[in-house]
Image (tube, coloured by chain):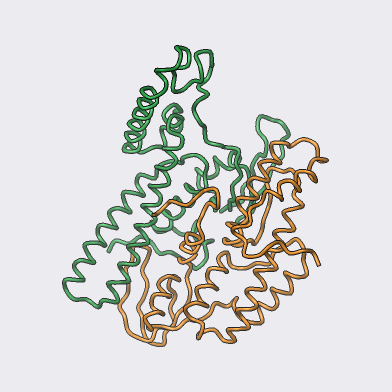
Chain colours: A green, B orange
């Protein structure tokens, strides 16, 4: 079976040194997605590869069962399959949860929209349309003229203040994979930096580590 | 259902933390012959009687439950090492000793399924529990001494411990950050944040300083 390169040593420190297996990557993506307050970049290639491998293993298991292979081995393969499926499903479900939570925001913001997959975008648009329609029919059309928008509180609002935004100032726990030096404050307030050695754990504001997570230097725990 | 943890209690459910820990490699000694296993997560095997081999924790537990192998307890789980760590933990008020990130989960799984493979199992178990208590207590007391910063370094804290304190620390740090200005407010904020803490993830109430 086309399994990817070895998992390497026994500690998580080897992950960045040697190439990591798809399961490791999927686990990392799942963890990051769960811990982050906003939706992260969709790992399309990873999900596709994982789906292929899962299908392959499902077929293999069917063959094994038909050929009467040792039931212990079959059950072990089944367990591994279950674990991978759980990761994949949970990853997709967490993303859906975030999409539903910040529905209008995801469609409005360019950056967020880029991070969705094709199917997620279709889902989000349809969901937002349905929700807007529901609100309009049940409540909004019965309100006075100025208050009929789904996105704005009233016609005099300058921004879309009825749209909940992800809370980027929230604190997350992270561990860095390399030596990383980050600016604590933005826009030249007081340029304090925090330096993270490899393997340090930090409670830190999400905004500060956002870029480093995308580039893979930092993992969320 | 996968992915449906209540974000107000904790980000990851204990089962999910255990799930993540189950990929850690442990050493087992099989007592039967089995071919190499080509899993999605990696290749493991060959399994030859009396030849130790490294497998993920979940696989090891599955084999053990079917009586196909015995465990080699990891090096850090010896009585000597744990006693040393316990003393070091008790001595220092603010630093944590280096323990494997998932030591709680690994120890729990080994005690549940492989207790006959651990020498001095009662001693080891009570040592691990003592270490857990001391560390949790240290975490609780250290939480009261946060300054209003944007980043707090927590070294050598394990996965389970992080998961337990995460909701509280998140809210406390956010409150600090919001009221970031004068240092004089730190004492007042700490006390009020502490009272809001929910106790449902902690097995015991906060211990008093001796």
Quarter holding the C terminus of chain B?
bottom right
Residue B154 in percent (x, y) is at: 67, 56
In the image, taking residue A114 as reference, residue B112 lies left or right, namely right
Task: Identify the residue shown where x is 57% and y is 60%.
Answer: B159
The quadrant in which residue A77 appears is bottom left
Q: How many marks?
A: 0
Q: Nearer the viewer, residue B35 or A57?
A: A57
In the image, taking residue A20 as reference, residue A51 lies left or right, namely left
Above or below residue B201? Residue B6 is above
Residue A55 in percent (x, y) is at: 25, 57
Above or below residue B6? Residue B156 is below
Q: Nearer the viewer, residue A172 or B40?
A: A172
The quadrant in which residue B171 appears is top right
Residue B140 in percent (x, y) is at: 71, 58
Quarter holding the N terminus of chain B?
bottom left
Q: Residue furthest right?
A: B184
The quadrant in which residue B91 appears is bottom right
Above or below residue A115? Residue B162 is below
Residue B31 in percent (x, y) is at: 38, 86
Task: Identify the residue shown where x is 60% and y is 78%.
Answer: B125
In the image, taking residue B96 as reference, residue B12 lies left or right, namely left
Above or below residue B165? Residue B34 is below
Task: Identify the residue shown where x is 39% and y is 18%.
Answer: A141
Q: Nearer the viewer, residue A129 or A121?
A: A129
Task: Identify the residue shown where x is 60% and y is 83%.
Answer: B122
């Amino acid at each position: 079976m086309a399994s990817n390169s070895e998992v390497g040593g026994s500690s998580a420190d080897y992950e960045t040194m040697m190439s990591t297996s798809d399961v490791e990557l999927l686990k990392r993506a799942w963890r990051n997605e769960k811990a982050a307050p906003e939706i992260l970049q969709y790992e399309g290639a990873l999900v596709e590869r994982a789906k292929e491998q899962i299908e392959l293993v499902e077929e293999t298991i069917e063959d094994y069962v038909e050929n009467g292979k040792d039931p212990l081995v079959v059950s072990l393969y089944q367990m591994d399959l279950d674990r991978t499926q759980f990761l994949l499903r949970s990853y997709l479900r967490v993303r859906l949860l975030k999409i539903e939570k910040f529905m209008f925001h995801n469609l409005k913001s360019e950056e967020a929209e880029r991070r969705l997959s094709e199917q997620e975008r279709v889902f989000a648009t349809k969901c937002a349309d349905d929700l807007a329609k529901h609100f309009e029919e049940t409540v909004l059309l019965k309100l006075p003229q100025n208050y009929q928008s789904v996105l704005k509180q009233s016609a005099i609002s300058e921004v879309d203040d009825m749209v909940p935004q992800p809370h980027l100032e929230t604190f997350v726990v992270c561990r860095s994979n390399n030596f990383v030096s980050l600016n604590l404050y933005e826009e030249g307030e007081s340029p304090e930096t925090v330096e993270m050695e490899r393997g340090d754990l930090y409670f830190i504001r999400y905004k500060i580590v956002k870029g480093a997570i995308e580039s893979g230097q930092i993992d969320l725990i | 259902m996968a992915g449906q943890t209540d974000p107000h209690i904790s980000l990851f459910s204990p089962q999910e933390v255990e799930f993540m820990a189950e990929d850690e490699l442990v050493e087992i000694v099989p007592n039967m012959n089995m071919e190499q296993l080509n899993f999605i997560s990696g290749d493991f095997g060959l399994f030859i009687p009396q030849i130790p081999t490294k497998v993920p924790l979940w696989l090891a537990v599955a084999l053990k439950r079917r009586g196909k192998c015995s465990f080699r307890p990891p090096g850090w789980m010896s009585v000597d090492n744990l006693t040393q760590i316990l003393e070091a933990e008790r001595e220092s008020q603010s630093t944590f000793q280096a323990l494997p990130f998932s030591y709680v989960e690994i120890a729990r799984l080994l005690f549940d399924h492989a207790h006959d493979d651990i020498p001095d199992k009662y001693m080891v178990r009570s040592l691990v529990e003592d270490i857990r208590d001391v560390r949790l207590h240290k975490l609780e007391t250290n939480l009261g001494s946060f300054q209003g910063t944007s980043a707090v370094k927590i070294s050598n804290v394990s996965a389970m411990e992080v998961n337990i304190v995460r909701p509280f620390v998140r809210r406390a740090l956010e409150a600090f950050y919001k009221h970031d200005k004068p240092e004089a407010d730190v004492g007042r904020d700490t006390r009020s944040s502490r009272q809001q803490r929910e106790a449902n993830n902690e097995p015991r109430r906060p211990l008093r300083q001796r």
